[in-house]
Image (cartoon, rainbow, N blue to C red):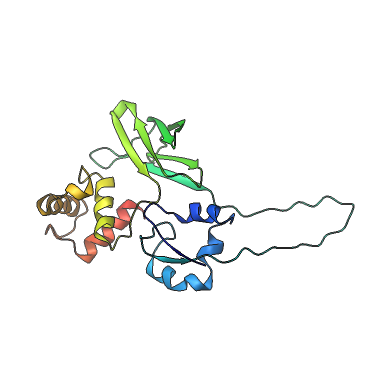
Amino acid sequence: MNYTIQQGDHLSGLAEQFGFANYETIWNHPNNAALKATRASAHVLYPGDDLFIPDRERKTVSGATGMIHIFEVALKPLEVRVVLEDFDNQPIAGAQCVLEIDGATRDLVSDASGLVRSRIAKSAKKGVLRVPSLDLEIPCQIGSLDPIDEDSGWQARLIHLGYYKGPIEDATEDLLASAIEEFQCDYELEVTGELDEATRAKIQDAHGV
């Protein structure tokens, strides 16, 4: 069947919804080759993308009776990852954090690289990471990041990287140009305030996806 991606969909969640333990079973299907060629990551899709969902296939394995057989299933857990950095882009290590996802909370600590990570349910949709010592709350919208080639995609990445504060829909051309200039300056790019391909690529590289 064909499925039209909606805002907030992510492949791990869709795999669970349609009964697949591993999202790669869907992503690597030949009918999704065109989509794979368009999207750099299976986890960053765009509303309106057409995803093929194959039929589930029953797998049988023969084995001798009267014996214990152990079967391993390849699972792809879903994680939330946030890197904490200071104003000099240096990692903030050892920060006590509280992650709340869909109402469930857990205590976490950033590692030496400033990374805070945790496995989350594949059905997860939204949450927040709180860092009390920094008086910081970071919204986590699972599956809501758009591809880098969409305006909403590169703008969201600039927000995540700390170059613009506020909702995307409130960003004016002047505010975005200022954010781009600051980013270009920090990453030693030509400072133009305009989004060229080199800047777009560096935004994606700095963001990580």
- Please indicate whether residue 78 sits to the left or right of residue 63 in the image: left
Question: Which residue lies at the image location 43% right of the left edge and 37% below the top edge?
Answer: 101
Q: In the image, residue 88 lies at what x, y percent?
A: 23, 40
Q: Nearer the viewer, residue 2 or 150?
A: 2
Q: Please identify the residue farthest to the left as the structure is shown.
A: 174
Quadrant location, the C terminus:
bottom left
Quarter where residue 140 is shown: top left
Q: Please identify the residue farthest to the top as the structure is shown.
A: 133
Question: Which residue lies at the image location 60% right of the left edge and 66% below the top edge?
Answer: 55
Q: How many marks?
A: 0
Q: Please identify the residue farthest to the right as the structure is shown.
A: 66
Q: In the image, residue 131 lies at what x, y percent?
A: 34, 30
Q: Is residue 92 above or below residue 72?
A: above
Question: Which residue lies at the image location 53% right of the left edge and 69% below the top edge?
Answer: 29
- Please indicate whether residue 162 sits to the left or right of residue 56 in the image: left
Q: In the image, residue 205 lies at what x, y percent?
A: 32, 56
Question: Which residue lies at the image location 12% right of the left edge and 54% below the top edge?
Answer: 173
Q: In the image, residue 127 lies at what x, y percent?
A: 39, 38
- Please indicate whether residue 18 sits to the left or right of residue 79 in the image: right
Q: Is residue 185 above or below residue 105?
A: below
